[in-house]
Image (spheres, rainbow, N blue to C red):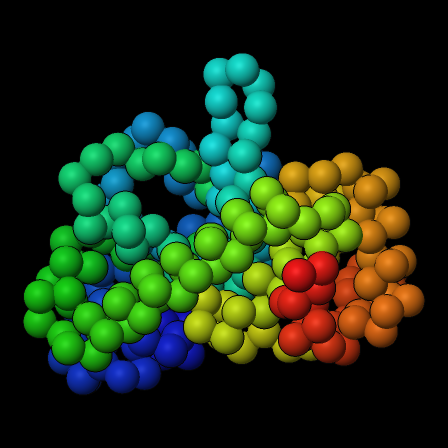
Amino acid sequence: MLRRTSWAQSLSAEHFALACEGTCEKLITTGGYICRKGEPVTHWHGVIEGLAKMSSDWVTGKTASFTGIAAGGWFGEGSMLKNEMRRYDVIALRDTRVAFMRAETFHWLLDNSIAFNRFIISQLNERLGLFIGLLESERLLDVDARVARTMAALFHPVLHPGMESRVAISQEEIGYLAGVSRQRVNKALRSLEDAGFLTTEYGGITVLDLGGLRSFGG
């Protein structure tokens, strides 16, 4: 599994062996927590198969959805670099296989591998750009545009490498990621399909114009 990841392919044989030794795999069932807000940060995570949502649940009952994490996506590097409790939840939206790399392994690679350092810098930069874009759509754009940007984020070439044009995702799952109801997602998808950006079918969505989704509404 690790050999297929973009960052592992650039490691030396010694560093790759250490990464494998410090990483385990777990199955998180639908609705389960991969990691939780307020807990110590002990691992760096990668989604092997499935779909997860990064969000923050408030004591008021409100939930702020940040982004989805599809297969091939790694997350939590920012939390690993700060000496604080985790500031968000990551929940499996379906049964999801997840890689857990120990903090000690992560920091050893950071200290000893230039290739790993470059990947983490790129990852942080790309995630910052993604969050700025999602914040813009949340503050300035309508629901159709929010759904479009949410879908486009799943196909980010750095954060979710290897994604194909068709993604197996339900309207309910898109609603969880975009922070809107399933009924409103249905309406938005019809608008995006009419515009020629995607097609919807049972059990999934095929993206026809990724650039159009990224710029929709703005």
- In this view, which residue lies farthest toward the left? 112
- The answer to whether 26 is drawn above or below residue 195 in the figure is above
Answer with left or right where residue 53 lies relative to residue 186: left
Q: Determine the residue positioned at 63% across, 67% down.
A: 214
Name which quarter of the figure residue 168 lies in: bottom right
Query: Is residue 55 at all visible to an observer of this figure?
Result: yes
- The answer to whether 147 is drawn above or below residue 214 in the figure is above
Q: Nearer the viewer, residue 3 or 62?
A: 62
Query: Is residue 171 at all visible to an observer of this figure?
Result: no
Percent position of residue 60, x then y: 54, 15
- The answer to whether 186 is drawn above or below residue 3 in the figure is above
Percent position of residue 108, x then y: 11, 62
Answer with left or right where residue 54 lies relative to residue 120: right
- The answer to whether 174 is drawn above or below residue 198 in the figure is above
Name which quarter of the figure residue 86 lies in: top left
Q: Determine the residue positioned at 52% across, 48% down.
A: 135
Q: How many marks?
A: 0
Q: Nearer the viewer, residue 72 or 210?
A: 210
Q: Quadrant of the C terminus?
A: bottom right
Percent position of residue 126, x then y: 40, 66
Q: Determine the residue positioned at 82% across, 52% down.
A: 188
Percent position of residue 119, x then y: 28, 72
Q: Quadrant of the N terminus?
A: bottom left
Answer with left or right where residue 152 lies relative to residue 55: right
- In this view, which residue lies farthest toward the top? 60
Answer with left or right where residue 25 lies relative to residue 142: left
Q: Determine the residue positioned at 58% across, 69% down.
A: 155
Name which quarter of the figure residue 120 lies in: bottom left
